[in-house]
Each structure stands twice: as C-alpha cells, then as structure tokens.
Image (cartoon, grey):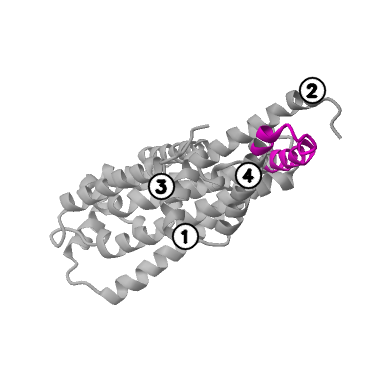
Amino acid sequence: MIINLQSFIEKERPVWDELEALLVRIGREPFGSFELEELKRFHYLAERTSSDLIRIREFVTQTELQAYLESLVSRAFGEIQEKQANSMRFRPLHWFFKVFPQTFRRRARCFSLALAITVVGSLFGGGAVLFDPDAKVALMPFSHLKGDPSERVAKEERKTGSDLDGKGSFSAQLMTHNTRVSILILALGISWGVGSIVLLFYNGAILGAVIADYLMAGEGIFLTGWLLPHGSVEIPAILIAGQAGLLLAGAMVGWGNRLSMKMRLRAIGPDLVTLIGGVAVLLVWAGLVESYFSQDHEPALSYGLKIAVGLVELVLLFAFLFFSGREGEVDD
C-alpha cells in the first residue's frame, strides 16, 4: 500500500523515464545490438513498472497515470514477446547483410588489433626474406612457393585448357582448409589470446615473405593479379576470425569487467557465432574465386582484368562491412 502518493511518483518517475527511453531506442535498433547488461536492465525496469502499475491502481483518481504505466508495460512486454518469437526464426539474408556487419563494427577494436598483429607479422616475414632469401624455405608452408618465382610464373603462363573437375575439388579443399584455420584462430582465443596472436602473426609472416620474394624477382604484376582477386576477401575473412579470437581472449581476461567469466562468455557468445559464420560465407566466395579465376593467368586472362576485379571486390567488401545495416543503428 502506498502511503504518500506524491513521494512514490517522484521516486519511481526515473524508472519510468528510463524504460521509455529504452523503448524508443528499441524502435530504432534491434535487440541484438544490446549488451547483456542492457537487456537485464530492460527486463528489470519492465517488471518494476508492472509492479508500480499494480500499486497505483489503488488510487481511482490517478487514471491518467495508470493509462501511461499500462502503455509502458504493454509496449515493454510486447517487445520481449516479439524478441522471443524472432529468436526462434532465422533469417539468413537479414543476418548476413545486417547483423553480421553491425557485429563487425561493434567489435571493431578487436579487428584493428588483429590487423595490426598481421601487419607486424608481414613486416617480419618480408624483412626476413629481404635480408636472407633462404629464409623463405622455413617460412613458406607450401612447396610451390619455395621455388624461384620467375620459374613458377613462366610455368603458370604456359598452362592451357581448364579442368573444371579439378577446379571444383581444389575449391572445396581451399574452403575447408581456410575455414579450419579460421575456427582455430577463434578457438585459440581461449588461451587468453596467445594462440590467436601467434597464428595471426604467422599468417602475416607468410604473406610478407611471399610479397617480398615475388617483388625481388620482378614479378609484382603476376603476384597482384594472382593474390588480389581472392585475397581481397580471404585475407579480411582471416582477420575477422582473428577479431573473434581476440574478442574471446578479452572475455577470458576480463580487464575492467566485474562480471564473472561465465557471464562474460555468455555476453559475447552471439557475437562470436555471428563473426565466424560471416567468415565462413566470405571464405566460400574466396575459394570459388581462387579456384575458378585467380589460378588463370596471361595470356588466357589479362592481369589488368584480374587486378580490376580484385579492387572492385575490396571496395565492395569495405562498403559492406562499414555501411551495410546502418539503417536505424545508433552509435554507442
């Protein structure tokens, strides 16, 4: 029973105002963009306002206030029910074109760190080959990269014909291999990020060594035409996997976060699934391009055309990750 109505209203008004502000925000952006603590706060505010509504009904003179609280409670629990219904229905296009890029932007700091680690690795690998050409034998994981670049270019440009069956199996192998690497980079985040950092650095070292080796041999045009069409998607996809691994590492370490580790991991779970799922989709495209496009060279396929296609892919991927799904998105 409320003894002092005016005091009760003054005390509870901030709760109602906060709930109303959250409802306005929900109208502009999806529930999926809310942090776990924000969702818990929303549920608390809805339940407390519902309790206030029951108590205020004792006063028959407060019909206007009662109607206002009924509206708040109705909207709040309506949003909760809608979220529960939507969570049972997966919409692939909405997920890929909206949820995935939104998640990428929300966790952009982890991506920037993954990029920085890879760049440092590239500088190390490139520098190692520049100062000691024999170092590529230790750095290169594939036999076709350990030989002389000019000999490989000459051999590739002499190839004629197209084995579609071979391209199909090669494409499947690429997708499987790159997806496994990406999942491993994510999973190693559980080592407090050490494993993810090592793999990102090593991938960067390989890339830097390959670039330095081909540039030193005067095969920069071949290298760009070979790497750019698929690398413009594949390399960012690996970096996003690193982003997910570092996000997991951050939850394991928990700097500045008073939640338990279990709660921290629960909070980032949906984002990890979204990021690695997006990586898998990107790697499917990269595998198809590498198998059916990147492996064909002059005179069969102009290097200028291959480079142009790679640049277009890179611009489109940049636009997708940084601008797709911005409608109704509210910056934190």
Q: Which residue is mark 1?
A: 91
* In magenta segment, residue 120: no
2 and 4 marks in contact (CB < 8 Å): no
> Tag on residue 194?
none
Q: Residue furthest bottom?
A: 165
Q: Earlier in the sequence, mark 2 or mark 1?
A: 2
Q: The N terminus lies in which quarter of the figure?
A: top right
Q: Residues within 10 Å of mark 4 (few under 14, many from 20)?
A: many
> Which quadrant of the view contains residue 174?
bottom left
Rendered image: mark on residue 236? 3
Q: Earlier in the sequence, mark 2 or mark 3?
A: 2
Left or right: 270 in relation to 214: right
Disc 2 is placed on an element classified as helix
Residue at figure coordinates x 48%, y 49% from the top left: 99
Secondary structure state at the residue bearing disc 3: helix
User: How far apart, in angstroms, are the residues tagged by discs 2 and 4?
Assistant: 25 Å
Which of the two labelled residues, at mark 1 and mark 3, occupies the earlier sequence position?
Answer: 1
Three-letter amino acid code of the residue under disc 2: Ser
Could you tell me how far apart the alpha carbons at marks 4 and 3 are, in whole angstroms?
A: 39 Å
Boundaries of the magenta span: 43-67
Q: Which labelled disc corresponds to residue 7?
A: 2
Q: Element type at marker 4?
A: helix
Q: Is residue 109 visible?
A: yes
Q: Nearer the viewer, mark 1 or mark 3?
A: 1
Residue 167 picture location, percent across and down? 30, 70
Crowd class of label 2 (few under 14; some 14 to 19; many from 20; radius 10 Å): few
According to the picture, the residue beneath numbered tag 4 turns out to be: 76
**Residue 260, percent from left and from top:** 75, 42
Instruction: Write the residue at 60% across / 34% down.
Output: 20
Q: Earlier in the sequence, mark 2 or mark 4?
A: 2
Position above or below: 297 against 36? below
In whole angstroms, how far apart are the C-alphas of marks 1 and 4?
Answer: 24 Å
